[in-house]
Image: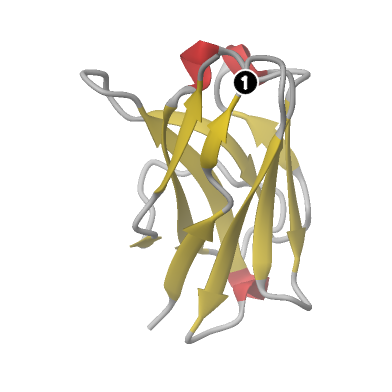
Amino acid sequence: QLQLVESGGGLVQPGGSLRLSCAASGSTLDSYGIAWFRQAPGKEREGVSCISTGGYTSNLTEHVRGRFTISRDNAKNTVFLQMNSLVPEDTAVYYCAARFTRQSIVCDFPKYDYWGQGTQVTVSS
């Protein structure tokens, strides 16, 4: 059973940066497409970015284009989300999710098999 644990969230000023980590245990991430989602208070969950087993990436929202970068280190069994130029609208709980797949290019799936518990990101002065 794959387990995901997010970390790296916190309070940051507008314009600042954070790097979120999604660490996996129970299985290796090699065969999983990984996505980051976020949910702000009173809003629906929103896909942020995803990365395929082959390392292909995709932004799932235009709001983070040019500011957020997703990457994976299979040796560390971890996926990262580097977030730069943060704005208050980025405030949310950020979740990582995994989908077992044999497709090396696709990472945007309608359903994911495993979810982490989330990490809070607050952007405020």
- SS at badge 1: loop
Q: The C terminus is located in which quarter?
A: top right
Query: 120 or 60, which is in the foreground?
Result: 120
Is 112 on the left-hand or right-hand side of 6? Answer: left
Residue matched to label 1: 13
The spot of residue 55 in percent (x, y) is 78, 53
Q: Is residue 91 above or below residue 26?
A: above
Q: Residue at x 71, y 58 (%)?
A: 104
Is 75 on the left-hand or right-hand side of 87? Answer: right
Query: 75 or 54, which is in the foreground?
Result: 75
Task: Name the amino acid type tagged 1.
Answer: Gln
Q: Residue at x 73, y 76 (%)?
A: 76
Is 102 on the left-hand or right-hand side of 115? Answer: right
Among all residues in the image, which is located at the extreme front? 125
The spot of residue 86 in percent (x, y) is 65, 20
Mark 1: few, some, or many residues within 10 Å (few <14, many ≥20)? some
Query: 113 or 103, which is in the foreground?
Result: 113
Q: The N terminus is located in which quarter?
A: bottom left
Q: Is residue 94 above or below residue 64?
A: below
The spot of residue 75 in percent (x, y) is 78, 78
Picture mark count:
1
